[in-house]
Amino acid sequence: MLPTPLDKYRNIGVAAHIDAGKTTVTERVLFLTGVTERLGEVHEGTAVMDYLEEEQRRGITITAAATTCWWEGHRVNLIDTPGHVDFTIEVERSFRVLDGVVAIFCAVGGVEAQAEAIWRQAQRRKIPRIAFVNKMDREGANFQKVVRELREVLDANPIPVQIPAGAGENFSGIIDLVALTLLTWDETSLGVEMKSEPVPEGLLDEAEMAREEIIEALAELDEPFLREYLEEGRASEEAMVAALRRSALALKAVPVLCGSAFKNQGIQPLLTAVTRYLPSPEDLGPAKAFAVRGGEPVEIGPDANGPLAALVFKVLADRREGILSYFRVYSGEINAGDTVAAGGGEIRVERLFRMHADEAITIEKASVGEIAALAGPTGLRTGDTLSAIGKALALEPIRSPEPVMVVALEPKSEADRELLEKEISELLLEDPSLSAGIEEETGQAILKGMGELHLEIAIGRLTRKKNLALQVGQPKVRRIEKLGGSGDGEAEFSRETPEGICRALVKVRIVPFEEKAPTQFSSLLLSRLGPQEVEAIKAGVAEALETGGTKGFQLGGARVEVLQVDQTGADGLTALKVAAQRATRKAVQAAAPREAEPWMEIEILGPEEVTGEIISDLMARKARIGGMEQRPDTRVIKAKAPLSQLLGYATALRSRTRGRASFTMQFAGYQEI
């Protein structure tokens, strides 16, 4: 039996644009739920969830951190995700195992670039969300502007369940529109003491009008609410909460709250909103898995007595416990000491933990709905499924984005070279959005990542962890080749073996596909082949795509259709692989590939007097200006530019504006050169 009923579980993520106050919100949640005894502060480097040395030094979240707290009888498993675009894999793999998201928005900045990207990630996965407009105490805070941007920029249907009492230095509390009360906090108690009282006369008209807007919106969205409202002639608090919950879970609406995390105002109502409006594992129903051998889809869970199915979504090298593999249980339960199927083999679960940031708390078992970690086996990777022996299942894997930047690493001694290979393999295990290889022309080790900051932090970890002496080259942009159209290719390969002649013929067609997606394979023929033959064909295709077409760059945005496979003779796997490789290369050449480079969406914030300098510099970098926005004492400039022209941009921007401007950017796609 579960210690907490499954309908009282909430697996949520906290996500936002960088510097919107996401980690500050999380720290207040931990303090007010009694998990921590003191408030951690990002700017002081004392935030519990930012436990890496780099996070504390830079004041940003780099890796997703998990914890657990309890509120009003609910167990809240919470993951604090990074807000910087270079660490988007941390958001993607966290969203893969979460049931709900708390999206944090700055009351001044509104819907900023990375906030939009994160929102789209959640939307793609159909994750219910609530929005929290933070920093209402800041000068220029505008709650209604953020609500409007949620609707216009994100195509959301925001329903404010709170409105602020004042803004900026006049921010004094929050009006709960559902209960029609004014909430205020005693600052001397660090937000622990919250007072609820009737809405004062001067704010009552505004509050009642805003409440009527909620009622009208719910009457359109939720038929049970409309029926009850017409029968009773009034909207009770209970009926509004139930209708808001149904609308949020159906992705028809986004409840919007507000507050100031730094001033410890608004966190208790936010926690209550998590329990009210975000789903439990039961609400989302069964997950889809595939039987590893049969390939047939099956629905599993959420059932503690069902077959074990758990997804590994993060692997981390812990200084105390060794390699930790974080997982979410979708069905069944897993006990310390169990032997389970994983990654095509079997592993023994030596120890189980509930994680609180970097603190591992020993537990005996993890059941359905839980997020936990295991120590012991070193062969697990992000995306592996844990299942019962003899009943191996595979849940939907986690896809990593393709890296867009590369840097060369040259060890200063042979001993350092051997150590570098070992440390890089561990780094790649932790971060699937990094990749490594050897530069063919120079023989140098190369590391590929999502941006300058991503590579800088990865290299910093390499050098500091084992005192590696490395010579680091200048970052280079990673180009790809895009198909100009579709193309067919056919190849035959035969060889003589002791058992006789082995022959294979493969014919493929390659067509353009979504460029940010990994290569897709499509063929009814593959389902009629054995798993070894399929893997041989896929390996041959992958090797051909790695070297691309005319320029030798990797091919991006392709779907490969296997049209014909003929095979005779024994031991035909090698022949199949070679034939598939040659056929794919011919198809690529027929599809007229073209060289393309990554472009970035960039958003620069600075005072009006430096706007001219910023735009002039952007034009020199071949940028396309997308528009400007006026904020209090600040201009926001939006543009797109080739990543190759933005190398070193942080230093250049600081120099040109004397440190008065800042920027964020995210990957926009590849464009032909």
Image (cartoon, rainbow, N blue to C red):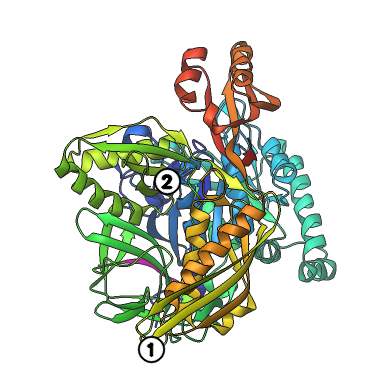
Magenta-drawn segment: 368-373
Residue nearest the observer in this picture, 1 or 322: 322
- Image quadrant assignment for residue 417: top left
Where is residue 291? Give x, y as percent. Answer: 49, 83
Where is residue 653? Give x, y as percent. Answer: 50, 19
Of helix, strand and loop, which one carries label 2? helix
Which image quarter holds the C terminus? top right
Where is residue 484? Give x, y as percent. Answer: 69, 49
Residue ID at (55%, 56%): 101
Disc 1 marks a residue whose amino acid type is Gly
As displayed, is residue 528 above or below residue 478? below
Picture disc at residue 390: 1
Disc 2 marks a residue whose amino acid type is Arg
Q: Where is mark 2, residue-wise?
A: 28
From this viewpoint, is residue 519 visible?
no
Magenta stretch containing residue 598, yes or no? Answer: no
426 displayed left or right of 605: left
- Image quadrant assignment for residue 202: top right
Packing grade of label 2 (10 A; few <14, some 14-19, many >=20) is many
Residue ID at (73%, 45%): 151
